[in-house]
């Protein structure tokens, strides 16, 4: 029972991280019907902002050396700004383009950012020591619980509650929900598309900034394509949960993260490298049973 509880604790932490990634992707898809594959690179922007630009192997902390409140605020602000600027410069002029063009644009942004990281920071992985105390463990009834796991779950729960309150209680939040249901009708009723989409990108940037800090504290390594696995799992989670619904994105992210953590714990060492293959095999099985995702989507597919 202790072993099962330990696996559940580890799964909860990883599932919370994937949930935040999936929510960032789901927010953009909800209003723009776009899978923004640059979301993972927004996470990398926040991670690389922690260190001084240099191609050397050794790293020197920049924002990562600031006190935690200032560091969190600065990283979140930088990633939110990057998301807003991307929306304004790239996606807004292409608003009326077909979905394929928007998708290619998101890939172009992703490759541009990855090569920028290569140019400025070099291609070698860099070790970063942020939040060293978070690796300490609590021992409760034989269970080992890392402080980082507790922080990840608490932060995720707080962000979910804040996001729900924002979407249900604020004027712009209600407009985002209306746009995700039927963008054309929402515009006819006076919802300004530019404002709604800009806020959605800002929120996705906020989530990406938080994920970047939690991910770096967990892995301790930076590399130019570090956001690619995260955005891939976030995209799969959005599909599994149900495209076009934030509830589905949250459920899908939690489900994929939990499956991944459980498989990592129960697979023998000889099959450990095949964990992702087993995860995607289970994803195929879920989609065969629920082609529309775990959560039924009610939103219109129209994008105006």
Image (tube, helix red, strand yellow):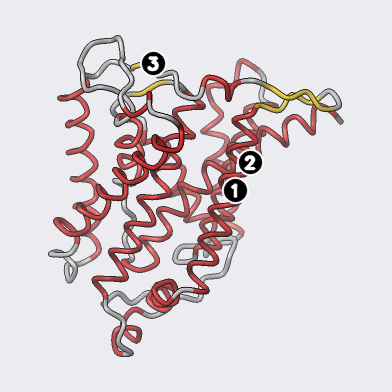
Element under label 1? helix
Task: Return the residue at label 3.
Answer: 127
Q: Position of residue 102 (x, y in %)?
A: 22, 59
The residue at the point 54 percent across, 26 percent down is 274
Q: Is residue 238 left or right of residue 43?
A: right
Residue in front for this viewpoint, 80 or 236: 80
Q: Is residue 239 left or right of residue 112?
A: right
Quadrant the C terminus occupies: bottom left
Between disc 3 and disc 1, whose residue precedes? 3
Label 1 environment density (alpha carbons within 10 Å; few <14, some 14–19, many ≥20):
many
Of badges 3 and 2, the one in the foreground is: 3
Marks 3/2 in contact by CB < 8 Å: the verdict is no
Q: Are marks 3 and 1 in contact (CB under 8 Å)?
A: no
Q: Is residue 261 above or below residue 169?
A: above
Q: Which residue is mark 1?
A: 254
Dot 2: what SS? helix
Q: Which residue was labeled with disc 2?
A: 258
x then y, percent, for residue 109: 20, 45
Find residue 111 and report its horizontal and vertical position in percent: 20, 38
Picture quadrant where residue 210 is located = top left
Task: Relative to 134, say whether 36 is above or below.
Answer: below
Q: Residue at x 52, y 43 (%)?
A: 18
Determine the CA span between mark 1 and mark 2: 6 Å
Residue 300 at least partly seen:
no
* Horizontal and vertical percent position of residue 214: 49, 34
Disc 3 to disc 1, C-alpha distance: 28 Å
């Amino acid at each position: 029972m202790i072993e099962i509880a330990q696996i559940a604790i580890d799964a909860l932490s990883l599932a919370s991280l994937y949930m935040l990634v999936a929510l960032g992707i789901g927010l953009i898809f909800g209003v723009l019907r776009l899978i923004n594959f640059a979301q993972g690179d927004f996470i990398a922007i926040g991670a690389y902002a922690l260190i001084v630009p240099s191609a050397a192997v050794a790293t020197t902390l920049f924002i990562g050396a600031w006190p935690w409140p200032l560091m969190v605020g600065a990283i979140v602000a930088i990633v939110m700004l990057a998301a807003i600027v991307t929306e304004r410069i790239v996606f807004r002029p292409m608003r009326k383009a077909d979905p394929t063009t928007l998708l290619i644009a998101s890939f172009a942004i992703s490759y541009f950012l990855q090569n920028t990281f290569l140019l400025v920071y070099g291609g070698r992985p860099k070790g970063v020591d942020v939040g060293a105390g978070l690796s300490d463990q609590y021992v409760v009834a034989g269970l080992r619980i890392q402080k980082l796991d507790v922080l990840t779950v608490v932060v995720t729960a707080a962000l979910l509650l804040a996001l729900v309150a924002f979407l249900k209680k604020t004027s712009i939040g209600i407009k985002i929900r209306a746009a995700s249901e039927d963008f054309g009708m929402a515009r006819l009723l006076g919802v300004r598309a530019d404002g709604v989409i800009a806020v959605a990108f800002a929120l996705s940037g906020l989530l990406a900034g938080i994920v970047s800090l939690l991910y770096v504290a967990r892995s301790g390594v930076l590399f130019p394509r570090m956001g690619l696995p995260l955005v891939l799992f976030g995209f799969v989670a959005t599909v599994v949960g149900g495209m076009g619904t934030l509830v589905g994105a949250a459920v899908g992210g939690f489900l994929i993260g939990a499956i991944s953590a459980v498989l990592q714990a129960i697979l023998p060492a000889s099959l450990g490298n095949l964990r992702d293959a087993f995860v995607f095999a289970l994803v195929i099985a879920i989609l065969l049973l629920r082609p529309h995702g775990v959560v039924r989507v009610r939103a219109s597919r129209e994008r105006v």
